[in-house]
Amino acid sequence: MNVKTMAQYAAEGKEPEILFWVGCAGSFDDRAQKVTRAFTEILNAAGIEFAILGNEEQCTGDPARRAGNEFLFQMTALQNIETLNMYKVQKIVTACPHCFNTLKNEYPALGGNYDLVHHTQLLQELIDDGRIKLTEGGTFKGKRITYHDSCYLGRINGVYEAPRATLESLDSQLVEMKRSKQNGLCCGAGGAQMWKEDEAGEKRINIERSEEAMATGASVIAVNCPFCLTMMSDGVKAKEKQDEVMVLDLSELVVQNLVR
Amino acid sequence: MIQQILFLIIAGGASFYAFRQFMAIRQTILLGQDEEISGDAAERWRNVLLIAFGQKKMFKRWIPAVFHLFIYVAFLFTQIELIEIFIDGAFGVHRFFADKIGGLYNLILNTIEVLSVLAFVATFIFLARRNLLKVPRLYSLNGWPKLDGNLILIFEVVLLVAIFTMNGTDVVLQGIDPDHYPDTGTLAVSSWLGPALFGGLGEGTLVVLERVGWWLHLGMVLLFLNYLPKSKHLHIMLAFPNTFFSRLKPRGEMENMPEIMNEVKGMMGLTEDTGEVNMEEELPDFGANDVTGLSWIDILGAYTCTECGRCTSECPANQTGKKLSPRKVMMDIRDRAEEVYTKIESGKEEYAANPEQPVSKDNFDDGKSLFDYITREEIHACTTCNACVEACPVLINPLEPILKMRRYEILTESAGPGDWLPMFNAIENSGAAWSMTIDREEWTKAE
């Protein structure tokens, strides 16, 4: 893929428009890698000069901090800030709402100040500005799509409309779940839950949420977060509905309808 | 004259006793750590006006919001009447303002009467929601919290009965003895309810009934004032400071720990500080295992909580059967804070961490901690989704104490869920949340 690192830009004496913060899930998780590639394709199609940190990127520290391990959070966060400030990074886009939140809201207190944009916000911007074009009557025209608000993009950072506007530009039929926007139900992975077994209970949270999403009759569950992607996919699989219901990130929906 | 003396003794005594209880609560809240109050004062006042005064967040569920509003506005207006009751009681006069403020008096009385009827209806609806309709978040309470919720509503019914007895008999008496019972003008409720209930009764009986209504009204107000500090109902006062002091930082920002940040910066050679830890100094406790490790704002939140359960009813962990309940977290903090305060006040040596010093907030150990109230299983179940924070109508933040307890567990005890260790190790050793064999740029190589 056509991807340059910050180090390559620096070697050429250039600065990219924006840094794409890939995140651990986006770099390593098989499923999330597809989202990363889809989003990269879109950035390239829009002709945006972007860079990644590549091997200089580290975990933002979100799961460590929320588990209570402040020491580890500070170590990884301060290292990242060193790297970002060395490259004089100003604008960052990321496809992970947890990275988004930590970079945007928590790094300033440690000396890292950046202009953050979530990939769903950038997608909407690119569509609105005509920098990418979507096919008329594309794959998702008229299809019922439900949108799952991730906690860290929605309730915690107040981004509800940009992802929905993007879905509407696909000419799909957006159906809301009973619990949405401010009242959206968590997928169950936040707060470092992704890395641990559930506490004892009656049900897994991702099953509860997947059932709610499937109850809308949608054939696509659109998500904006790699953890939600895993949790919702697992939920759909647990109900053996993976042939009828697809769980897709917004960039995967857009890339399928991209006019190239 | 006897009534005046009696009034001064009862009102004075009850007010004094209530004042002492409120001071004790203030001290209990201040068991918490200092927290800097920063940010835009105008935004804080806006929160007080919109959220406490204007009840903005209540209207996310409009049915309880409307009935709650009836009781709330009736309560506010009844305070105006209370001014007259205190003047009448202290100076032995009757309806002091009746002939002094003209038509305004009639307007105020009528406003109170109409609101009281609405509050009366609302009170019964709330009793029904708690006991007959069994609204889960209310019905799920047991023991004292359940009784507390019902008692407050019953007090309100008695208070409203007192108001209508007082006004109803007064209206009838105005016709019999206008010299002692000044004209109040036509009253929306009492002008027909009074004659209907009390018409035909002898003057002596009416005078007694009017006094019963008046004293009962006063008595309920004073009882309520002294009941409040023991009850969940404190929110009628503390909602205002709680919305004012509610943190203004972004929801997604966990409070930074500068002491750890500076140490890490030192270790990384980012500051002059070498990062060497003075081994002779005792390592401080990080996070919180007791109310004294929380912020006073967290304890204020616990006292502000009226146990409505909106947080718990929105909590994804609780909704899927986990033990975590944000409401219980706040109730536990209040119970533990009360316990710690009472034990410190007792001055008993057995509660002193260092027995050579007198027991105090900083020299306290009763062999218990907040973990005896809030279990580890509960705090481990939290997804930090902020649904509880979003749900609270008075801006209490149950997430903050949960995260402070997690910090204590990991940083001070080196404990916590074993499942997290591989993640910690991976971040520490390879800068990734999972231990991986491929590098970060691997995905770029595929076509």
Image (cartoon, helix red, strand yellow):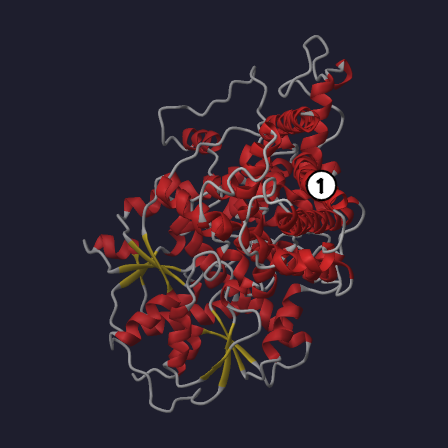
Q: Is residue A90 at all visible to an observer of this figure?
A: yes
Q: Is residue B429 above or below residue B230?
A: below
Tell me the chain of label 1.
B
Q: Is residue B344 left or right of residue A48?
A: right
Say which element carries label 1: helix
Q: Nearer the viewer, residue B243 or A190?
A: B243
Q: Residue at x 73, y 39 (%)?
A: B373
Q: Looking at this rendering, what residue extends furthest in the top direction? A: B356
Q: Amino acid under label 1? A: Leu
Residue B71: where, in percent of width, then height?
A: 60, 53
Residue B189: where, in percent of width, then height?
A: 61, 59
Q: Residue at x 40, y 82 (%)?
A: A256
Residue B367: where, in percent of width, then height?
A: 76, 26
Q: Which residue is mark 1?
A: B216
Q: Is residue A1 at all visible to an observer of this figure?
A: no
Name which quarter of the figure residue B363 lies in. top right
Q: Looking at this rendering, what residue extends furthest in the bottom direction? A: A137
Q: Is residue A35 above or below residue B290?
A: below
Q: Is residue A260 left or right of residue B363?
A: left
Q: Residue at x 42, y 56 (%)?
A: A100
Q: Looking at this rendering, what residue extends furthest in the right direction? A: B143
Q: Is residue B259 above or below residue A179?
A: above
Q: Is residue B161 left or right of residue A251?
A: right
